[in-house]
Amino acid sequence: MPRVWRRRGFIIGAAIVVISIGIVFASIPFLPRTHVSITSSASHSVHGGSQSYPGLYALKIPGVLNNQNLAVGVVVINGTANFCVIEDSIVEPWVLSGNATNAPGSTFPSNSCIVQQQTAQSTIQFTATSQGTWDLVALNTSSTQITVDFNPA
């Protein structure tokens, strides 16, 4: 009889271990994703604008890796802002060509944003689709100047 009890104990123990491992692997997709954020807070005024030619400020986030998860806390004072996460390589030439100063026919390239969110206070989260510098752009379509605080998340 002792052999039978040992064998049953071994089988029960093995079953518990297998079930435990299964539960751990099944739980992995539900774990919170870790993310990278900016290292210090920054505050910037964004002049008033319009729907066609918004005021804007682009917070540059350099050294982002492909498929890296990022999060930045934002607080808008005196209104709301439309936030756009976009590659710097798209925004920089657009700004340098004078498009950000209400040049006719050159609206902001919002179709290239990987995340768009209008808010007064939130955490903007995104996963980079390529390596390099990314911009978190605050767009102000109100005629009133706003201030945007960017914070580590």
Image (tube, grey):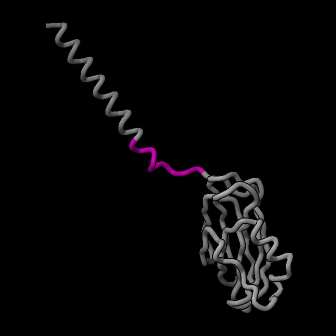
Q: Position of residue 114 (x, y in %)?
A: 62, 68
Which residues are the magenta region? 26-34
Q: Residue furthest top?
A: 2
Q: Residue at x 85, y 79 (%)?
A: 97
Quadrant where the N terminus sits is: top left
Quarter location, residue 147: bottom right
Tell whether position 11 is magenta: no
Q: Position of residue 38 (x, y in %)?
A: 73, 58
Say if 98 sits above or below 70 in the image. Answer: below
Number of numbered discs: 0
Q: Residue at x 30, y 28 (%)?
A: 16
Say if 50 sits above or below 66 in the image. Answer: below
Q: Residue furthest front?
A: 105
Tell whether position 33 is magenta: yes
Q: Position of residue 44 (x, y in %)?
A: 79, 74
Quarter location, residue 129: bottom right
